[in-house]
Amino acid sequence: MATSDSRPVLIFDSGIGGLTVLREARVLMPERHFIYVADDAGFPYGGWEEAALKERVITLFDRLLAHHDPEVCVIGCNTAFTLVGADLRAAFPGMRFVGTVPAIKPAAERTRSGLVSVLATPGTVKRAYTRDLIQSFATRCDVHLVGSENLARMAEAYIRGETLSDDAVQAEIGRCFIEKDGRKTDIVVLACTHYPFMANLFRRLAPWPVDWLDPAEAIARQTRRLVPPLQVLAPGEDIAIFTSGNPDFATRRLMQGFGLQVNRSVDPIRLRRLAAVDMAAAAQVHRASFDQRLPHLTGLHSPEEDLRYWREHLFNECEIHGAFDGDNLVGVVAFNQGLVEQLYVAPSMQGRGIGTRLLEIAMARFSELSLWTFQCNAVARRFYEKHGFVAVKETDGSRNEEREPDMRYRWARAGAKGAAPA
């Protein structure tokens, strides 16, 4: 654990947008070292159900605080803080949290036309917290909330150096510009830390000049007020942590450009090929995950039947790899000749990128893969589709023992020819 004189500042965001806050914080706290945490396994936050997002963020912070003992935590994500800020402070009363909220108060103070737009994720737009800010500080203004489904993802791509079409960007920001009674919008609040990276692009595409209000500097100033200054440089490197455990090359290069050493995941999850002695634990992970996602099928097989299936069939027919948290098996993948037979992650360990890391073992072995999943398992379907799998067949389930309608998915590496094997 770090001493009170050298504890790091932790900056948390759903993706890499919080780097705008890190940039400003370093200017004001050059003697401190920083931990940047990107919940890329959960990105983007805008579409999450509120209860699920609360649980996810609090669970992540339980582990982050235990591992890193920061001086202060900065939540560089409007969507997260407007929802879970109060819960974080209640769950961790010994930790100080600096939140990111839409800069509605300074916008109301600066506007001359009285027309202010707030560009945010759908999650931030719908929060009662956002409307409370308007009611408290901007009742004399006409505040227009603009929720963008796509802009956070677009910003991540733009930060990594990808080219965006002007038309696509204009489609997201166009609704910010209002003309009313001879007045025009003169301030747009950037209520997502991803957006300031695109400010120059926004300025170029705007139909008229406006003040694009970036909250990063104000967040850094508030953090500086809470963090005691040091007379000497704190020991240690600035690091970046990714909950997926697998940032791509462009992201790693970006982190290096910000002077961050990539520490891939929140927890040190180990991967290895499983032996016969591991099959009992593999069967338990299988059953716990299966019952969580498909509770109406609970009890279809006994624990003894599960173990026999793993020991006598899967172990003999498949290549099987596992993910370990310490000595505990928490995830498993089994595949054979381009068919992914099983992929399960223990319920308590989901959302940490373990499934991605296991699936990528199979993806590295074959240029083409196929698998089956139940139609009702929406979580699994989203996971596979996120990783490039495409649904190619649906059945009524009459040929599987569960009698549950299922789907076949296929994946092919770019440039691969032909279809995935049966």
Image (cartoon, helix red, strand yellow):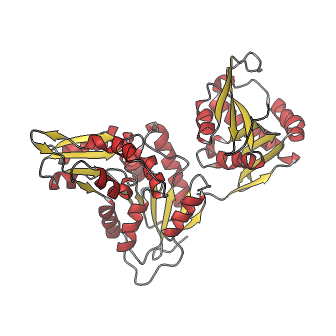
Question: Residue lying farthest left?
Answer: 182
The residue drawn where x is 77% and y is 20% is 401
In the figure, is residue 238 to the left or right of 409? left
247 relative position to 332: left or right: left
Residue 419, image x and y in percent? 74, 34
- Disc tally is 0
Residue drawn at x 53%, y 68% as measured from the top left? 256
Question: In which quadrant of the rendered image does the C terminus lie?
Answer: top right
Vertical order, 312 against 136 (above or below): above
Residue 217 visible in the shown view? yes
Residue 36, compared with residue 276, is above or below; it is below
- Please name whichever residue, 210 or 418, is drawn nearer the observer in this view of the structure: 418
Considering every residue shown, the one lying at the far bottom of the view is 232
Picture coordinates of residue 287, whole percent (x, y): 73, 34
Residue at (9%, 42%) from the top-left corner?
182
Q: In this view, does 395 lie to the left or right of 302?
A: left
Where is residue 200 shown, x and y percent of the image? 33, 58
Q: Which residue is drawn at 47% across and 73% down?
A: 33
User: Which image quarter: residue 127?
Assistant: top left
| Location of residue 402 in the rendering, given as x and y in whole percent from the top left corner | 73, 21
Question: Is residue 310 left or right of 52 when viewed as pictured?
Answer: right
Question: Which one is nearer the viewer's eye here, 310 or 88?
Answer: 310
In the rendered image, which quarter contains the N terminus? bottom right
